Amino acid sequence: MGKIKTVKKESPEEKRSRAKKIVSLLMKSYPEAMTELTFQSPLELLIATILSAQCTDVRVNIVTKDLFKKYRTVQDYAKINQAVLEEDIRSTGFYKNKAKNIIECCKGIIERFGGKVPNRMEDLVTLAGVGRKTANCVLGGAFGIVEGIVVDTHVARLAERLGFTKESDAPKIEQDLMDLIPKSYWYFFSNALILHGRRICNARKPNCSGCPLHIYCPSAEKYLLQMK
């Protein structure tokens, strides 16, 4: 286990340099990092991402396995009775709000975008249930377009632990990360950090002793001391 490099007051340049080293380590640990949501089209990724709020990707994939066979087009979702869709997605949690958003979102796609999921951030965020997080997921995963960094609970937690932000608001966290991480790595970085948050740096008991990032993490020493 390498010696922890204590992170004191950093200049912006020093923080960017540390961030690049962390990206390099993430690339070695998660070379093919991508969303774990199962999808075959932009519409499927959009629906799956809406369902993933406050729900695990594993559970979403279980639900969408049947959902995507039952509903195949935006028209299918737009015309479905909300109560029926609620039952289809009940196990993902917050199903009433999610069902309403999915139906309204698909109506918006039909009315304003010719029935096709738009591939621009400014268009996606006008749809019901779609914020920057969901839009970034869809743009990066379905279209290969990078406009920002996905900030979910894992990314927010790790960004704070790594000393990359002091913000608690997702858009502000995203901006702090975009200032540090080269744009060419934004999509990879968010997906790798999500995987790292699930597998190593979990919320209650982060596995700092088994973490490849620990030598560049200002929180590692604190958690390692707690383990002794």
Image (cartoon, rainbow, N blue to C red):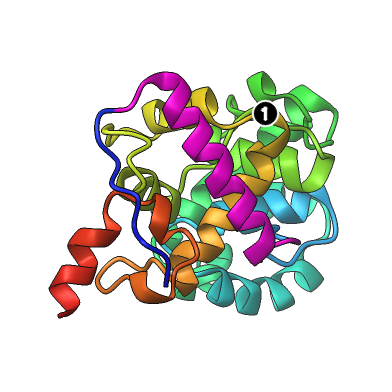
- Residue lying at 64% horizontally and 45% vertically, measured from the top left: 137
| Residue 173 among those drawn in magenta | no
Return the residue at label 1: 183
On screen, residue 140 above or below 192: above
On screen, residue 137 above or below 38: above
Whether residue 152 appears in this view of the structure is yes
- Residue lying at 63% horizontally and 66% vertically, measured from the top left: 29
Which corner quadrant holds the C terminus? bottom left
Which corner quadrant holds the N terminus? bottom left
On screen, residue 89 above or below 128: below
What's the amino acid at mark 1? Lys
Residue 59: x and y in percent read 54, 76
Residue 117: x and y in percent read 78, 37
In the picture provided, is 148 more to the left or to the right than 131? right
Q: Nearer the viewer, residue 81 or 188?
A: 188
Residue 72, quarter of picture: bottom right
Range covered by the magenta-colored residues: 10-31
In the picture provided, is 210 more to the left or to the right than 227? right
- Residue lying at 48% horizontally and 73% vertically, measured from the top left: 199
